[in-house]
Structure formats: structure tokens, C-alpha cells
């Protein structure tokens, strides 16, 4: 029964990491597109200037959240 619980935790961790990688990738694309003059997050208003930092930070936290749980 413990093996089943461990597998469920690993799957949820991989989902978190997948979402984290997507957020970091979106942050990179958003940052690069800002130099081309394209705003990917106009719905955020004045905060859209900092959206790559925000999305990248959230993604990084999701990617590294499993490392903190295992320690």
C-alpha cells in the first residue's frame, strides 16, 4: 500500500514540474517577445512589465517544490 502512495506523489510531482516548465518557457517567450514589441500579457495592465519575472518565479518554485519535500 505504501508503494501506491509513493507513486501517486511522484505523479503529482511530475505534473507540478511540467506546469513549472511551461511557466518558465512562457516567461522566456514573453521576455523575448517584449523586445520585438509584442505584449503577450496586456490583460495584466501595468504589471505586464514584470510578467516574465512573475511567471518564471512561479514556474521555478513549482519545479523545485519536490526537492524541498524529499529533504
Image (cartoon, rainbow, N blue to C red):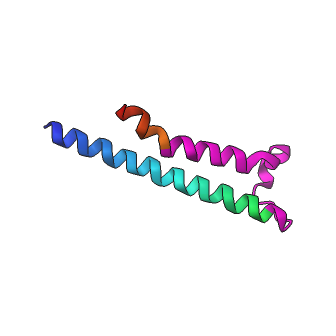
Q: Is residue 4 left or right of residue 50?
A: left
Residue, x 45% and y 47% (percent of image)?
16
The quarter of the picture where the N terminus appears is top left
- The answer to whether residue 48 is magenta is yes
Determine the image quadrant of residue 28.
bottom right
Location of residue 32 in the rendering, given as x and y in whole percent from the top left corner: 75, 63
Determine the image quadrant of residue 54.
top right
Q: Is residue 11 left or right of residue 39?
A: left
Residue, x 24% and y 40% (percent of image)?
6
Q: The magenta stretch spans which residues? A: 34-63
Specify the principal SS of the magenta part: helix
The quarter of the picture where the C terminus appears is top left
Q: Name, please, the residue furthest toward the front.
A: 71
Residue, x 43% and y 33% (percent of image)?
68
Location of residue 50 in the rendering, given as x and y in whole percent from the top left corner: 78, 46
Q: Name, please, the residue furthest toward the bottom.
A: 36
Q: Is residue 10 above or below residue 69?
A: below
Determine the image quadrant of residue 26.
bottom right
Location of residue 33 in the rendering, given as x and y in whole percent from the top left corner: 77, 65
- The answer to whether residue 11 is magenta is no
Q: Is residue 52 above or below residue 65?
A: below
Amino acid at each position: 500500500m505504501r508503494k501506491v502512495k509513493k507513486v501517486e506523489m511522484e505523479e503529482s510531482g511530475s505534473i507540478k514540474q511540467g506546469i513549472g516548465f511551461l511557466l518558465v518557457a512562457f516567461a522566456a517567450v514573453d521576455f523575448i517577445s517584449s523586445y520585438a514589441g509584442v505584449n503577450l500579457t496586456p490583460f495584466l495592465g501595468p504589471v505586464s512589465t514584470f510578467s516574465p519575472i512573475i511567471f518564471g518565479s512561479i514556474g521555478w518554485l513549482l519545479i523545485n517544490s519536490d526537492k524541498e519535500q524529499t529533504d
